[in-house]
Amino acid sequence: MIATLLLVTGILFFWLVLKAFTSREIKTRGWGFRTRMYRRDSEPVRYWVSLSSYLVIAV
């Protein structure tokens, strides 16, 4: 059961990484219920930090 949950979570985050890499923007969750969009061109550091953390979670 736990392995299935981890597999689904990994697939979800891998899909988010692919979507962010192709669209050049990533949606992250802020404090509370706010969401933020980071674009590779305007905020590259926040974009790459978020993308790499999603990739670590996916692995």
Image: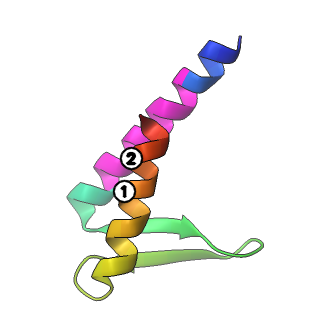
Categorize mark 1 by other alpha carbons within 10 Å: few (<14), some (14-19), many (20+). few
- Vertical relation: 54 (above or below) 14: below
- Vertical relation: 17 (above or below) 25: above
Q: Residue 52: which disc?
A: 1
Amino acid type assigned to the residue bearing label 1 in the image? Ser
Residue at 38% across / 47% down in the picture? 55
Amino acid type assigned to the residue bearing label 2 in the image? Leu
Nearest to the observer: residue 53 or residue 37: 53
**To which residue does mark 2 refer?**
55
Q: Quadrant of the C terminus?
A: top left
Contact, mark 1 vs mark 2 (Cβ under 8 Å)? yes
Quadrant assignment, res 35: bottom right
At which x and y percent is residue 56? 43, 45
Residue located farthest toward the top when viewing the structure as drawn: 1
Taking the image as shown, residue 3 lies to the left or right of residue 18, namely: right
At which x and y percent is residue 39? 32, 78
The span picked out in magenta is 7-19
The verdict on residue 31 being magenta is no
Quadrant assignment, res 2: top right
The CA distance from mark 1 to mark 2 is 5 Å
Residue at 59% across / 25% down in the picture? 6
Q: Main secondary structure of the magenta part?
A: helix
User: Could you tell me which secondary element the residue under label 1 belongs to?
Assistant: helix
